[in-house]
Amino acid sequence: MTDRATNPAARRGRPHRVVVLALTGLLPFELGIPHRIFGRAHDPAGRPLYEILTCGLAPGPVRTDADFAIEVAHGPELLATADTVVVPASYELGPVYYEGRLTPELAAALAHVRPGTRLVSICTGGFVLAAAGYLDGRRATTHWASAAHFQRLFPAVLVDPDVLYTDDGDVLTSAGVAAGIDLCLHIVRRDHGAAVANDVARRTVVPPHREGGQAQFIERPVPRPELASTTAARAWVLDRLHEPVRLTDLARQEAMSVRTFTRRFREESGVSPGQWIVMQRVERARQLLERTELPMEEVARQAGFGHAQSLRKHVQAALGVSPTVYRRTFRQREGE
């Protein structure tokens, strides 16, 4: 009997298929991220937008870094049916991690991946993509503790050690552990818009988007706990994105000098106050573009960009498309 999971002809009409490659020594938390995030994405009628399946280098138990194994039903031939392949981290990558070369078994498995398949790595799963040549000439990241080794091992890769994830179109990589959640939410947002991604984030009880990058998580002197944070200022500005906001106004909310506030804000968020505000305004614009028919000038005003030209500049820089194209794409998907 033909297995529907490995038969492309049987998949017509199915949701976008995500296949997760489980390797020996995997981290159970990271293996579960794609299933949790993609598995919670639904269209307005409640239909799942993704189908998530797991395969190994062979069917059967896959040892983890915990005191239990994962039973995997499918072998590597399942990769040939994937629209997206996700490679989570493993602590037992052997020559992949230490020498930058694939084992024969892993090379044979990746040979099943069809051209044009979207490739995603979580944490040190990026070493697998790099060893296979998928990251040559591309921007990529991995856990900050492995970033320098990653760059030495793969000099053709444009390693960015500071970001939570990278998006190079059909190849996406994330930093360590929980950054896989950020990346998978980003993919849902890219595929289906901010409303769907925000719903997934709410159901998962995580922020829909984390500011900053890995720099905020690298070990450094920790501010004394009695020192005030910048949380109140961020909450204050979110209610006033449509208004001009000065740095002195933000610092006043925390009773700090501008210099102290700016330093503390960057320590806590990983970006400057100005960068953070632009990111929040882009997110507000996305919501307005998806959910309303407001003219561009009004979207720009409500999002805090002032005028349509500024809206176009920032949306294009952040999303890679114009506000008009973004609205057309996601308003159409909502109506499908």
Image (cartoon, rainbow, N blue to C red):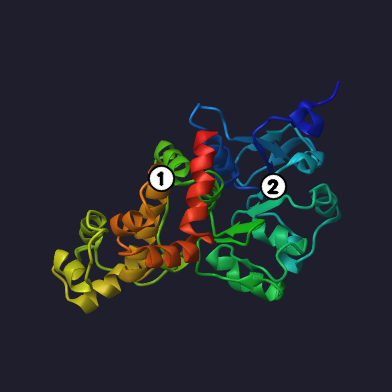
In the picture provided, is 26 more to the left or to the right than 105? left
Measured along the vertical axis of the image, is residue 61 above or below residue 269? above
Q: Residue at x 17, y 68 (%)?
A: 249
* Nearer-the-camera pick, 63 or 202: 202
Q: Position of residue 8 (x, y in %)?
A: 79, 34
Asked if one can make out residue 138 in the rendered structure from this viewpoint, the answer is yes
Q: Quadrant of the C terminus?
A: top right
Residue bearing the label numbered 1: 206
Q: Given the image, on which type of amino acid does mark 2 rest?
A: Val
Asked if one can make out residue 182 in the rendered structure from this viewpoint, the answer is no
Q: Given the image, on which type of amino acid does mark 1 rest?
A: Val
Q: Residue at x 29, y 75 (%)?
A: 263
Tell me which corner region of the image, top left, top right, bottom left or bottom right, holds residue 243: bottom left
In the picture provided, is 122 more to the left or to the right than 206? right
Measured along the vertical axis of the image, is residue 136 above or below residue 80? below
Q: Position of residue 260 (x, y in %)?
A: 22, 76
Near mark 2 (Cα within 10 A), the count class, few <14, some 14-19 or many ≥20, is many
Residue bearing the label numbered 2: 85
Which mark, by number, is residue 103? none
Q: Quadrant of the N terminus?
A: top right
Q: Residue at x 53, y 53 (%)?
A: 183
* Nearer-the-camera pick, 28 or 81: 81
Near mark 1 (Cα within 10 A), the count class, few <14, some 14-19 or many ≥20, is some
In the picture provided, is 14 more to the left or to the right than 222? right
SS class, disc 1: loop
**Proximity of marks 1 and 2: CB atoms separated by less than 8 Å:** no
* Nearer-the-camera pick, 259 or 245: 245
- Number of dots carrying numbers: 2
SS class, disc 2: strand
Alpha-carbon span between mark 1 and mark 2: 23 Å
Mark nearer the N terminus (1 vs 2): 2
